[in-house]
Amino acid sequence: MKLIISTCIIFAGLIFQSNFAAADTLPRRQVRLSIYNVQQTPTGRELLSPVSENGYEKLFDTLFFDDISNKKLFSVSLSSNKFSLTYNQHLMAASPVYISWALAQALADYKVLLIAAKYGVYDLKNYYERSHIQIIKAAQHWFELGSPNSHDYVDNPKEKINWFPRSTHSSVREFDQAWRRASMSDFLQKITQRHIFLGYTKISIYEDVKKAQGPKKQALQAIIKYYENLTY
């Protein structure tokens, strides 16, 4: 009988260890640590607030690395209040500190999607201003984190790794320096140039709001108000 009980305990222990190991793989560690780094700054905590009502477990369980467009650091979607956030798999080799810069961008975009969702709008175009909002909030987070530019992914010495941040114009050092030294208009212009280079929609939200009606117009006006609070 004792042998049976001992065997069961050992078997249960092996299952527990196996489950723990599975939960502590490199991708899950990178996700967990990127969330941790965003938690360290006032801007980061502000960005996390919509997904932290019941702790960060929901975000941890929602966020994964996957094969998405090589022109994107991340992908965010919101439909009927179902939130999805995916890191580009090519970020896997980056420092979790650097990945927190990408997460701040993603959460900033989620904030924009939430504003639109309040008006029942889920088909939001990738306006210039969406890119502006993403990188402004990420720049604020990075600055509050102490501008740890030694974690810039483009500095990885291996070309088979650094091609991704270079090809997406995602040097956090460059954006941090522009944030600290350039005027807001110059900073926005730098983001716009990247937006166009990556092949995103060449349209301003200010163009669409003139043509929009009903809830769509209200949604765009609300996003513009949020945007202008950041940029003026």
Image (cartoon, helix red, strand yellow):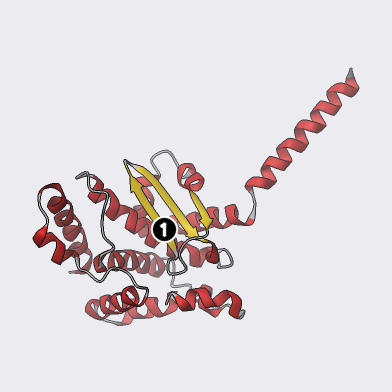
Would you name the residue on which mark 1 appears? 75
Residue beneath the point at 26% across and 69% down: 128
Name the element at disc 1.
strand
Q: Amino acid at mark 1?
A: Ser
Q: Is residue 41 visible?
A: no
Please state if 108 lies on the left or on the right of 155 as rendered: left
Q: Quadrant of residue 158?
A: bottom right
Residue 107 location, quadrant:
bottom left
Q: Residue placed at 30% from the left, 53% from the top?
A: 111
Give the number of callouts: 1
Is residue 154 rendered to the left or right of residue 185?
A: right
Q: Position of residue 125 (x, y in %)?
A: 26, 60
**Residue 57 visible at all:** yes
For the N terminus, the image quarter is top right
Is 162 placed above or below 140 here? below
Residue drawn at 39 percent across, 76 percent down: 176
Give the image quarter of residue 13.
Answer: top right
Of the 4 image quadrants, the one containing the C terminus is bottom left
Residue at image x 64%, y 50%? 24
